[in-house]
Image (tube, rainbow, N blue to C red):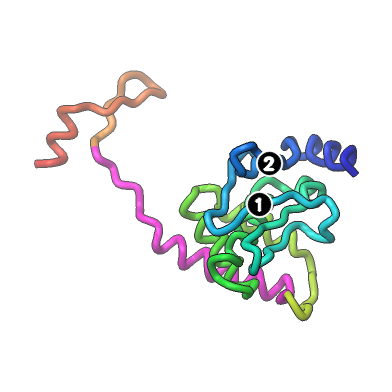
C-alpha cells in the first residue's frame, strides 16, 4: 500500500501526506491544522477521511487522498475539520470547507469541479447525501462565499517601468488619497 501511495502521489505530482512534528498535516504542498481537533493519519481508514467528534480528532487516509488532485486533498481535510465546527451534517461540513477555500484562495471554480468529480455518481447513504445533492449544495455555498469575499482594491495607480513590469508610484498613491 505504501508503494501504491507513492506511485499515485508521484503520478499527480504531490508528495504523500505526512504529519509534521508540530502536529500539522503536510499535504498537497500545504501545512494544514484544524484548530478544533488533532489530525492523525490512518492508512486503514476505508475512505478519504473521518471526524471523530467526541475525541476532537480528524483522520486522513494518506493512501486514498494521494489518488486525488491537490485541491480535493485540501478540501477533504477542511471538510473533516468542518465537522468539528459545523457538526455532523455533511452538507454543513462541505460548506465550511468551501468557505475556507475561498478565504484561503485555494478553491476556485475549477477546484470546485474537481471536488464534485471526486463524488462521482455516489448514491445517498444513511450518512452522506448523494454526490449530485452535495455538488448542488457546494455550488450554493461557493456563490454565497464569493459574495462575502472582499474585492481587491487598487491602492495606487500602477506605473509602467518597462513592458511587462509595473511599479507602484508614491506620487500616484497620494493622488488617489486626495
Q: Residue at x 67, y 42 (%)?
A: 27
**Of 22 and 82, the residue lying toward us:** 22
Q: Quadrant of the N terminus?
A: top right
SS of the residue under disc 2 = strand
Which of the two residues, 115 or 37, is positioned nearer the viewer here? 37
Q: Which residue is mark 1?
A: 39
Q: CA distance from mark 2 to mark 1?
A: 8 Å
Query: Depth check: 170 or 40 in front?
Result: 40
In the rendered image, which quarter is residue 58 located in?
bottom right
The segment highlighted magenta reads 128-155
Is 153 colored magenta in this rendering? yes
Q: Decide: marks 2, 1 in contact (CB < 8 A)?
A: yes
> What is the residue that sits farthest to the top in this orientation?
162
Name the secondary structure under disc 1: strand
Percent x, y of residue 12: 76, 40
Q: Is residue 110 left or right of residue 160?
A: right
**Alpha-carbon neighbours of circle 1 within 10 Å: few (<14), some, or many (≥20)?**
many
Q: Residue at x 56, y 53 (%)?
A: 34
Per the picture, the main secondary structure of the magenta-coloured stretch is helix
Q: Which residue is mark 2?
A: 19
Q: Residue at x 67, y 56 (%)?
A: 76
Q: Going from the N terminus, do you reach mark 2 or mark 1 first?
A: 2
Q: Quadrant of the C terminus?
A: top left
* Residue depicted at 75% across the width and 39% down the height: 16
Q: Residue furthest bottom?
A: 126
Residue 82 is drawn in which quadrant? Answer: bottom right
Amino acid at each position: 500500500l505504501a508503494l501504491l501511495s507513492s506511485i499515485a502521489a508521484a503520478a499527480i505530482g504531490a508528495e504523500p501526506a505526512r504529519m509534521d512534528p508540530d502536529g500539522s498535516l503536510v499535504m498537497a504542498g500545504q501545512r494544514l491544522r484544524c484548530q478544533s481537533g488533532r489530525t492523525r493519519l490512518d492508512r486503514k481508514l476505508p475512505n478519504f477521511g473521518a471526524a471523530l467528534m467526541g475525541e476532537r480528532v480528524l483522520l486522513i487516509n494518506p493512501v486514498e487522498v494521494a489518488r486525488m488532485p491537490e485541491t480535493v486533498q485540501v478540501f477533504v481535510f477542511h471538510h473533516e475539520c468542518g465537522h468539528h465546527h459545523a457538526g455532523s451534517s455533511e452538507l454543513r461540513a462541505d460548506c465550511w470547507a468551501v468557505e475556507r477555500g475561498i478565504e484561503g484562495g485555494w478553491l476556485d471554480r475549477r477546484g470546485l469541479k474537481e471536488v464534485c468529480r471526486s463524488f462521482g455518481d455516489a448514491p445517498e447513504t444513511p450518512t452522506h447525501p448523494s454526490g449530485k445533492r452535495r455538488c448542488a449544495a457546494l455550488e450554493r455555498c461557493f456563490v454565497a462565499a464569493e459574495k462575502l469575499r472582499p474585492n481587491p482594491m487598487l491602492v495606487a495607480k500602477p506605473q509602467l517601468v518597462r513592458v511587462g513590469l509595473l511599479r507602484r508610484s508614491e506620487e500616484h498613491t497620494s493622488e488617489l488619497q486626495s
